[in-house]
Amino acid sequence: MYTLKNIDGIIFDMDGVIFDTEALSMRCWKKVGERHGLENVEENIRLCIGRSTKDTKRIIEEAYGDKVDLDALYAESRQVIREAFAHDGIPLKAGAREVLEWLYNSGVKVGLASSTSYDTVVSEMKEVGLIHCFDIIVGGDMIENSKPDPEIYLLACDKLGVDPENTLAVEDSRNGIISASAAGMIPVLIPDLIEPDAEMLTRSHVKLKCLADFKDKLLSTGI
Protein backbone atom coordinates (compact mmCIF):
# COMPACT_ATOMS: atom_id res chain seq x y z
CA MET A 1 0.00 0.00 0.00
CA TYR A 2 1.13 3.54 -0.74
CA THR A 3 1.06 6.40 1.79
CA LEU A 4 2.76 9.78 1.97
CA LYS A 5 5.60 8.11 3.87
CA ASN A 6 6.63 5.65 1.17
CA ILE A 7 6.05 7.45 -2.15
CA ASP A 8 8.39 9.79 -4.00
CA GLY A 9 5.66 12.19 -5.08
CA ILE A 10 2.28 12.81 -6.69
CA ILE A 11 1.54 14.20 -10.16
CA PHE A 12 -1.94 15.45 -10.97
CA ASP A 13 -3.79 15.96 -14.20
CA MET A 14 -5.70 19.26 -14.19
CA ASP A 15 -9.01 19.30 -16.10
CA GLY A 16 -11.44 16.78 -14.70
CA VAL A 17 -9.26 16.14 -11.63
CA ILE A 18 -8.57 19.54 -10.05
CA PHE A 19 -10.79 21.72 -12.23
CA ASP A 20 -14.40 20.73 -12.81
CA THR A 21 -14.11 21.95 -16.38
CA GLU A 22 -14.82 18.92 -18.54
CA ALA A 23 -18.60 19.22 -18.19
CA LEU A 24 -18.44 22.99 -18.61
CA SER A 25 -16.32 22.63 -21.74
CA MET A 26 -18.77 20.10 -23.15
CA ARG A 27 -21.70 22.48 -22.59
CA CYS A 28 -19.81 25.31 -24.28
CA TRP A 29 -18.87 23.17 -27.28
CA LYS A 30 -22.46 21.98 -27.67
CA LYS A 31 -23.60 25.61 -27.61
CA VAL A 32 -21.13 26.53 -30.36
CA GLY A 33 -22.03 23.41 -32.33
CA GLU A 34 -25.72 24.30 -32.25
CA ARG A 35 -24.92 27.76 -33.61
CA HIS A 36 -23.29 26.16 -36.64
CA GLY A 37 -25.62 23.21 -37.06
CA LEU A 38 -22.92 20.65 -36.29
CA GLU A 39 -23.89 17.08 -35.46
CA ASN A 40 -22.43 14.66 -32.89
CA VAL A 41 -20.54 17.41 -31.06
CA GLU A 42 -20.59 15.64 -27.70
CA GLU A 43 -19.29 12.42 -29.23
CA ASN A 44 -16.41 14.18 -30.96
CA ILE A 45 -15.46 16.41 -28.03
CA ARG A 46 -15.32 13.36 -25.75
CA LEU A 47 -12.50 12.13 -28.00
CA CYS A 48 -10.58 15.29 -27.10
CA ILE A 49 -10.60 14.72 -23.34
CA GLY A 50 -7.03 14.37 -22.11
CA ARG A 51 -5.63 15.52 -25.44
CA SER A 52 -3.39 18.47 -26.29
CA THR A 53 -4.63 21.54 -28.17
CA LYS A 54 -2.90 20.21 -31.29
CA ASP A 55 -4.67 16.87 -31.09
CA THR A 56 -7.99 18.52 -30.26
CA LYS A 57 -7.78 20.68 -33.36
CA ARG A 58 -6.97 17.62 -35.45
CA ILE A 59 -9.99 15.72 -34.14
CA ILE A 60 -12.28 18.69 -34.77
CA GLU A 61 -10.86 19.15 -38.26
CA GLU A 62 -11.52 15.51 -39.12
CA ALA A 63 -15.11 15.88 -37.91
CA TYR A 64 -16.05 19.31 -39.25
CA GLY A 65 -13.28 20.51 -41.56
CA ASP A 66 -15.55 20.46 -44.60
CA LYS A 67 -18.30 22.44 -42.85
CA VAL A 68 -16.75 25.37 -41.03
CA ASP A 69 -13.60 27.44 -40.61
CA LEU A 70 -11.76 25.36 -38.01
CA ASP A 71 -9.62 28.14 -36.55
CA ALA A 72 -12.68 30.36 -36.17
CA LEU A 73 -14.69 27.53 -34.62
CA TYR A 74 -11.96 26.73 -32.10
CA ALA A 75 -11.49 30.40 -31.24
CA GLU A 76 -15.25 30.76 -30.74
CA SER A 77 -15.37 27.78 -28.40
CA ARG A 78 -12.48 29.15 -26.34
CA GLN A 79 -14.24 32.50 -26.13
CA VAL A 80 -17.46 30.90 -24.87
CA ILE A 81 -15.47 28.99 -22.25
CA ARG A 82 -13.62 32.16 -21.16
CA GLU A 83 -16.95 33.95 -20.83
CA ALA A 84 -18.19 31.15 -18.59
CA PHE A 85 -15.03 31.45 -16.45
CA ALA A 86 -15.43 35.23 -16.26
CA HIS A 87 -19.05 34.89 -15.17
CA ASP A 88 -18.75 32.03 -12.69
CA GLY A 89 -15.02 31.62 -12.04
CA ILE A 90 -12.97 28.51 -12.76
CA PRO A 91 -14.86 25.65 -11.09
CA LEU A 92 -12.86 23.44 -8.74
CA LYS A 93 -13.62 19.79 -8.10
CA ALA A 94 -14.96 19.10 -4.62
CA GLY A 95 -12.08 18.85 -2.16
CA ALA A 96 -9.41 20.04 -4.62
CA ARG A 97 -8.26 23.08 -2.62
CA GLU A 98 -8.27 21.19 0.66
CA VAL A 99 -6.28 18.26 -0.73
CA LEU A 100 -3.69 20.39 -2.53
CA GLU A 101 -3.13 22.67 0.47
CA TRP A 102 -2.81 19.60 2.69
CA LEU A 103 -0.20 18.07 0.38
CA TYR A 104 1.66 21.38 0.20
CA ASN A 105 1.87 21.54 3.99
CA SER A 106 2.87 17.89 4.19
CA GLY A 107 6.03 18.54 2.19
CA VAL A 108 5.47 15.79 -0.39
CA LYS A 109 6.64 16.57 -3.92
CA VAL A 110 3.67 17.52 -6.11
CA GLY A 111 3.60 18.11 -9.86
CA LEU A 112 1.03 18.89 -12.53
CA ALA A 113 0.98 17.29 -16.00
CA SER A 114 -1.75 18.79 -18.19
CA SER A 115 -2.47 18.59 -21.90
CA THR A 116 -3.37 22.28 -21.67
CA SER A 117 -0.63 24.73 -22.66
CA TYR A 118 1.85 25.73 -19.95
CA ASP A 119 0.97 29.43 -19.92
CA THR A 120 -2.74 28.65 -19.61
CA VAL A 121 -2.15 26.21 -16.75
CA VAL A 122 -0.04 28.74 -14.86
CA SER A 123 -2.55 31.54 -15.47
CA GLU A 124 -5.51 29.46 -14.32
CA MET A 125 -3.71 28.09 -11.26
CA LYS A 126 -2.77 31.64 -10.26
CA GLU A 127 -6.39 32.71 -10.76
CA VAL A 128 -7.66 30.07 -8.32
CA GLY A 129 -4.79 30.65 -5.90
CA LEU A 130 -3.22 27.20 -6.10
CA ILE A 131 -0.02 27.81 -8.07
CA HIS A 132 2.10 27.51 -4.91
CA CYS A 133 0.95 23.92 -4.39
CA PHE A 134 3.00 22.60 -7.32
CA ASP A 135 6.75 22.08 -7.41
CA ILE A 136 6.70 21.66 -11.19
CA ILE A 137 4.21 22.11 -14.03
CA VAL A 138 4.37 20.47 -17.46
CA GLY A 139 2.00 21.70 -20.17
CA GLY A 140 0.94 20.05 -23.37
CA ASP A 141 3.01 22.46 -25.47
CA MET A 142 6.21 21.28 -23.77
CA ILE A 143 6.11 17.83 -25.39
CA GLU A 144 5.91 16.33 -28.86
CA ASN A 145 3.50 13.48 -28.13
CA SER A 146 0.42 14.08 -26.00
CA LYS A 147 -1.43 11.60 -23.81
CA PRO A 148 -1.88 8.61 -24.17
CA ASP A 149 1.85 8.69 -24.98
CA PRO A 150 3.86 8.57 -21.71
CA GLU A 151 6.10 11.52 -22.67
CA ILE A 152 4.36 14.13 -20.50
CA TYR A 153 4.55 11.99 -17.36
CA LEU A 154 8.14 10.95 -17.95
CA LEU A 155 9.09 14.61 -18.34
CA ALA A 156 7.11 15.57 -15.23
CA CYS A 157 8.82 12.86 -13.17
CA ASP A 158 12.22 13.96 -14.44
CA LYS A 159 11.54 17.61 -13.55
CA LEU A 160 10.14 16.62 -10.14
CA GLY A 161 13.15 14.38 -9.48
CA VAL A 162 11.12 11.28 -8.69
CA ASP A 163 11.08 7.62 -9.71
CA PRO A 164 7.98 6.97 -11.88
CA GLU A 165 7.57 3.53 -10.31
CA ASN A 166 7.11 5.12 -6.88
CA THR A 167 5.01 8.13 -7.89
CA LEU A 168 1.23 8.43 -7.97
CA ALA A 169 -0.47 9.83 -11.08
CA VAL A 170 -4.00 11.12 -10.44
CA GLU A 171 -6.12 10.97 -13.60
CA ASP A 172 -9.73 10.97 -14.80
CA SER A 173 -9.46 10.17 -18.50
CA ARG A 174 -8.66 7.09 -20.54
CA ASN A 175 -5.77 8.81 -22.31
CA GLY A 176 -4.35 9.98 -18.99
CA ILE A 177 -4.51 6.57 -17.35
CA ILE A 178 -2.85 4.91 -20.34
CA SER A 179 -0.16 7.63 -20.37
CA ALA A 180 0.62 7.23 -16.66
CA SER A 181 0.61 3.44 -16.90
CA ALA A 182 2.94 3.47 -19.90
CA ALA A 183 5.29 5.76 -17.96
CA GLY A 184 5.54 3.07 -15.28
CA MET A 185 3.75 5.14 -12.64
CA ILE A 186 1.06 4.25 -10.09
CA PRO A 187 -2.18 5.40 -11.79
CA VAL A 188 -4.98 6.55 -9.49
CA LEU A 189 -8.29 6.80 -11.35
CA ILE A 190 -10.93 9.30 -10.23
CA PRO A 191 -13.51 9.19 -13.07
CA ASP A 192 -15.19 12.34 -14.33
CA LEU A 193 -17.20 12.41 -17.58
CA ILE A 194 -15.89 9.16 -19.01
CA GLU A 195 -17.14 5.89 -17.57
CA PRO A 196 -14.08 3.66 -17.10
CA ASP A 197 -13.70 0.84 -19.58
CA ALA A 198 -11.92 -2.46 -18.99
CA GLU A 199 -8.51 -1.15 -20.07
CA MET A 200 -8.74 1.88 -17.77
CA LEU A 201 -9.59 -0.33 -14.81
CA THR A 202 -6.86 -2.83 -15.64
CA ARG A 203 -4.20 -0.15 -15.97
CA SER A 204 -5.27 1.70 -12.80
CA HIS A 205 -3.75 0.81 -9.45
CA VAL A 206 -6.99 1.90 -7.80
CA LYS A 207 -10.28 3.58 -8.66
CA LEU A 208 -11.55 6.19 -6.18
CA LYS A 209 -14.75 8.20 -5.93
CA CYS A 210 -13.32 11.68 -5.38
CA LEU A 211 -10.35 13.70 -4.11
CA ALA A 212 -11.62 13.51 -0.54
CA ASP A 213 -11.46 9.72 -0.85
CA PHE A 214 -7.89 10.08 -2.14
CA LYS A 215 -6.88 12.05 0.96
CA ASP A 216 -8.67 9.69 3.34
CA LYS A 217 -6.93 6.65 1.85
CA LEU A 218 -3.48 8.28 2.06
CA LEU A 219 -4.14 9.20 5.69
CA SER A 220 -5.46 5.80 6.76
CA THR A 221 -5.16 2.48 4.97
CA GLY A 222 -3.05 3.70 2.07
CA ILE A 223 -3.77 3.46 -1.66
Image: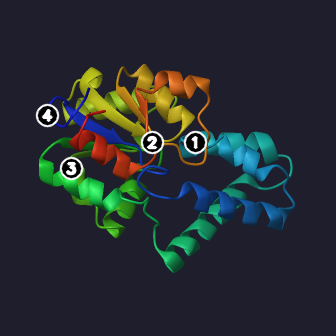
Badge 2 marks a residue whose secondary structure is helix
Measure how far apart labels 4 and 2 are at the Cα level: 30 Å
Between marks 1 and 2, how big is the CA–CA gap? 9 Å
Category of crowding for the residue at label 4, using alpha-carbon neighbours closer than 10 angstroms: few (below 14), some (14–19), many (at least 20): few
Q: Residue at x 32, y 31 (%)?
A: 155
Q: Amino acid at mark 3?
A: Leu
Image location of residue 190, percent across then percent down: 46, 42
Q: Are marks 1 and 4 in contact (CB under 8 Å)?
A: no
- Badge 1 or badge 4: first in the primary sequence: 4
Q: Please, what secondary structure does the residue beneath circle 4 have?
A: loop
Earlier sequence position, callout 3 versus callout 2: 3
Q: Earlier in the sequence, mark 3 or mark 1?
A: 1
- Circle 3 residues within 10 Å: few <14, some 14–19, many ≥20: some
Evaluate whether residue 149 shows in this view: no
Quadrant placement of the C terminus: top left
Amino acid type at circle 2 is Gly
* Image point (52%, 29%), residue name: 148
Tell me residue 222's x, y (percent).
Answer: 26, 34
- Mark 4, mark 2: which one is toward the viewer? 4
Q: Residue furthest front?
A: 221
Q: Are marks 1 and 2 in contact (CB under 8 Å)?
A: yes
Looking at the image, is mark 3 or mark 4 earlier in the sequence? 4
Residue matched to label 4: 5
Q: Which residue is mark 1?
A: 54
**Mark whose residue sits in front, 3 or 2:** 3
Q: Please give the residue where the numbered disc 3 appears in the rendered image.
A: 103
